[in-house]
């Protein structure tokens, strides 16, 4: 038997052993994952969640293009499609895309995608929400999707976005021991109202453990926000602000989102800012303890992987976002003429 013949037989055997399917058999179909974004591509809240979901799926053995195929759609309901009519139109487009894709699992990022799409699909698809600001119980009144958070019982579960607002106040109290009062700003959008509710719940749950007085101001327009910021800068009692108004319109109907709002804020405010999202510190805010959107996305991705492995969504508890990140913008710190203790800086996850 010739040497070349033996080499050929050996190569064929190696090929057959390494192949995931025997001759005549089809390879298993890839699982299909659809990620629906409430906001635009590269959004400072949406993108890290998406990246976290994909990373967690990979860690659990579901790599895009190998074990799964991922598709995504961005509804852009913060910057562009931000009226009820336009949001509903985007929801219709998203529903058609999801139905055409036929996913094995749907992951929704932030409230608008969940509220206008996940709760309105004609055919139930295993769904994992992420970054939900509105209380699950509130949405459950509109469309019953869960029995309890501990055991939802249906086809939907996910990760609720805990703000860690009181944790953020504690961090700033350590930086500024004389801190007596903070003022938060929220808008009137559905997300703004949900953030407002979350803040009140966290404050009420912590009770006397809240380290300083906390005032929440609802601003209805860009002009009102500007006036309130300037007014706050002159108030010596207030040592800290929490700019959580992320969608505002001026008297002419022009929309302002986080990048524009924060740029103006750091140019005109004399108070350090808590950053709701750690990426907001990168946009110029002072920083502190903030929602870790990448970690929250990973948390949701782990749940999605459990469902892809065979668990039922209704048997998986709805979770709160477990982790917050410490992030600071040193340019803003210097601009305000302030200092951060070295031990807190050393504990930071991100410094810009």
Image: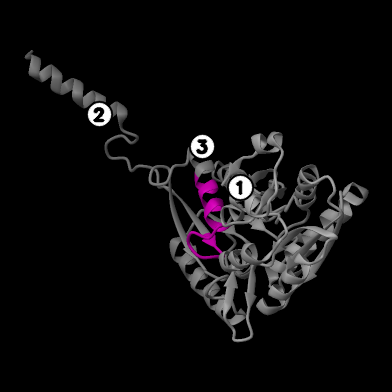
Q: Earlier in the sequence, mark 1 or mark 2?
A: 2
Q: Earlier in the sequence, mark 2 or mark 3?
A: 2
- Residue 42: say if magenta: yes
User: Which residue appears at 85% of the width and 60% of the height?
Assistant: 237
Instruction: Name the residue carrying label 2.
Output: 15
| Marks 2 and 3 close (CB-CB < 8 Å) | no
User: Which residue appears at 74% of the width and 65% of the height?
Assistant: 194
Q: Nearer the viewer, residue 272 or 347?
A: 272
User: Which residue appears at 73% of the width and 52% of the height?
Assistant: 162
118 up-or-down from 22: above or below: below
- Whether residue 128 is visible here, answered yes or no, is no
242 up-or-down from 312: above or below: below
Residue found farthest to the bottom: 252
Residue at disc 2, secondary structure: helix
Q: Nearer the viewer, residue 165 or 136?
A: 165
Q: Earlier in the sequence, mark 1 or mark 3?
A: 3
- Whether residue 341 is visible here, answered yes or no, is yes
- Structural crowding at the residue carrying mark 1, measured as other residues with C-alpha within 10 Å and reported as few (<14), some (14–19) or many (≥20): many
Q: Mark 1 or 2, which is nearer the eye?
A: 1
Give x and y (percent) for residue 243.
70, 63
Q: Nearer the viewer, residue 263 or 291?
A: 263
Residue at disc 3, secondary structure: helix
Give x and y (percent) for residue 183.
79, 62
Instruction: Name the residue carrying label 1.
Output: 330
Residue found farthest to the front: 337
Give x and y (percent) for residue 27.
35, 42
Q: Mark 2 or 3, which is nearer the eye?
A: 3
Quarter the N terminus occupies: top left
Q: Magenta stretch: give its range.
A: 36-54
Quarter location, residue 17: top left
Label annotation for residue 59 = 3
Q: Mark 1 or 3, which is nearer the eye?
A: 1
């Amino acid at each position: 038997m010739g040497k070349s013949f033996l080499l050929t037989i050996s190569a064929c055997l190696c090929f057959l052993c390494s192949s995931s399917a025997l001759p005549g058999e089809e390879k298993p179909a890839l699982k299909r994952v659809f990620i629906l974004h409430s906001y635009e591509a590269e959004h400072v809240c949406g993108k890290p969640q998406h990246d976290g979901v994909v990373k967690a799926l990979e860690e659990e053995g579901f790599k895009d293009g190998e074990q799964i195929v991922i598709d995504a759609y961005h509804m852009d309901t913060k910057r562009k499609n931000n009226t009820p009519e336009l949001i509903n139109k985007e929801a219709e487009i998203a529903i058609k895309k999801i139905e055409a894709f036929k996913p094995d699992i749907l992951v929704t990022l932030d409230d608008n995608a969940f509220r206008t799409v996940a709760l309105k699909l004609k055919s139930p698809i295993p769904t994992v929400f992420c970054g939900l600001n509105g209380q699950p119980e509130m949405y459950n009144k509109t469309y019953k999707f869960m029995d309890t958070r501990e055991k939802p019982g249906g086809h939907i579960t996910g990760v609720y976005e805990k703000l860690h607002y009181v944790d953020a106040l504690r961090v700033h109290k350590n930086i500024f021991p004389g801190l007596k009062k903070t003022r938060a700003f929220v808008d009137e959008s559905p997300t703004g109202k949900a953030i407002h509710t979350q803040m009140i719940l966290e404050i009420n749950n912590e009770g006397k453990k809240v380290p300083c007085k906390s005032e929440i101001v609802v601003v209805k327009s860009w002009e009102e926000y500007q006036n309130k910021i300037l007014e706050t800068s002159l108030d010596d009692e207030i040592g800290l602000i929490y700019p959580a108004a992320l969608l505002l319109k001026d008297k002419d109907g022009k929309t302002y989102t986080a990048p524009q709002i924060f740029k103006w804020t750091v140019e005109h405010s004399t108070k350090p800012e808590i950053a709701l999202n750690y990426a907001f510190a990168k946009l110029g805010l002072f920083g502190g303890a903030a929602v870790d959107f990448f970690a929250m996305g990973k948390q949701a991705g782990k749940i999605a992987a459990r469902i892809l492995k065979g668990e039922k969504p209704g048997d998986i508890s709805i979770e709160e976002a477990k982790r917050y990140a410490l992030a600071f913008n040193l340019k803003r710190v210097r601009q305000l003429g302030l200092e951060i203790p070295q031990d807190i800086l050393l504990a930071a996850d991100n410094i810009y």
